[in-house]
Image: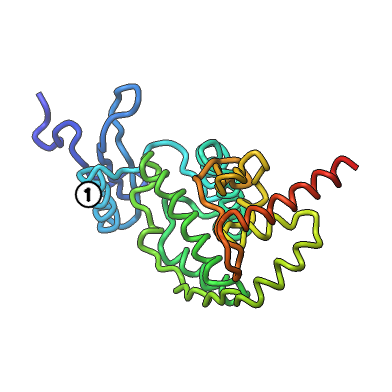
Amino acid sequence: MASANRNPNRSSSVYLGADEHWHGRVTVGERDDGSPDRRHVMSRSKSIVVGKVRALERLRDSGRVPRPGQAWTVKAWLEHWLFNIAQPSLRSSSFAAYRFAVEKHLVPALGRQRLNRLEPEHLERVYQAMIEAGARPGTAHQVHRTMRTALGEAFRRGYVSRNVAEVAKPPRVQPDPVEPFTVKEMRRILDAALTRRNGARWAVALSLGLRQGEALGLRWRDVDLELGMLRCVRRCCGRCIGMAAVGRGVGRPGSARNGCGRIRSWGRRSRVRASA
């Protein structure tokens, strides 16, 4: 029969130990082997121990208790997340952006910090230091998005009790105004492109607004010169993203076939040069 002074099984306890420190123990769940997961806190102050016990109880009741075991550092978690979790599911360009944010900014600034002790203010100081060092707000936003994604995965796995990057405020981004080419400027670009072996790239990019990777990823087999269609526009990583019509010559009257005529002539010249 349990003693009248003994707490029921698995309830929290606070007591003064023989080492003259106050100790607190809280059962927060079960370990993988089925044994109780009982956490321990201690201090010379009883009030501090009581506060820590109550905090653990709140985490337990909300289902946000960090997993047992050695705590991750920011460096160790970011590197594990980057190479073992993120990389297999990312395009090469997205992985490169994440890796730059981790290795250039996050690890040097926060790498030795315990992951479960990270606070929003730590991240905000990193963003502010980046801006003061000359980085653009957009770069700080990329670092913020990287950390938010990495901490989101740590939260889902129980390594942290909250995602502090969702609380931290990144710098405000003011988009740069877009100044499109005038018709005169586009005509000059096309005239200059006529003298180059890869001039078709510039004609198609200007006509359809392709990004550089999409234009560079085009192959002649993607172009139907009779129908005036690009059957598949590829990025540099080779992912198919859609179809588009080859439009009119820029700033000049005529049908889509007129624009394709110029591309056809470029294609003939490029193939002749390649075979020479």
9 or 150, which lies in front?
150
Horizontally, is 146 left or right of 23 in the view?
A: right
Say which quarter of the image contains residue 148.
Answer: bottom left
Instruction: Please tell me which residue is depicted at 56% across the width and 56% down the height of the picture.
Output: 256
Identify the residue at the far front of this view.
Answer: 254
Instruction: Please tell me which residue is depicted at 54% across the width and 36% down the height of the picture.
Output: 88
Type of the residue with mark 1: Arg
Horizontally, is 218 left or right of 274 in the view?
A: left
Horizontally, is 179 left or right of 120 in the view?
A: right
Check disc 1: other Cα within 10 Å, few if <14, some if 14-19, many if 20+. Answer: some
Q: Residue 125's spot in the image, x, y percent? A: 50, 70
Q: Residue 259's spot in the image, x, y percent? A: 62, 57
Identify the residue at the far right of this view.
Answer: 276
Residue where numbered disc 1 is placed: 58
Q: Residue 183's spot in the image, x, y percent? A: 61, 75
Instruction: Please tell me which residue is depicted at 56% across the width and 51% down the height of the picture.
Output: 98
Query: Can residue 126 be seen from the camera position used here?
Result: no
Say which quarter of the image contains residue 32.
Answer: top left
Instruction: Please tell me which residue is depicted at 41% across the width and 63% down the height of the picture.
Output: 120
Q: Could you tell me which quadrant the C terminus lies in? A: top right
Say which quarter of the image contains residue 196.
Answer: bottom right
222 or 65, which lies in front?
222
Query: Can residue 12 be seen from the camera position used here?
Result: yes
68 or 75, which lies in front?
75
Considering only vertical position in the picture, is 221 above or below 267? above
Q: Could you tell me which quadrant the N terminus lies in? A: top left
Considering only vertical position in the picture, is 204 above or below 154? below
Q: Residue 104's spot in the image, x, y percent? A: 63, 58
Q: Secondary structure at mark 1?
A: helix
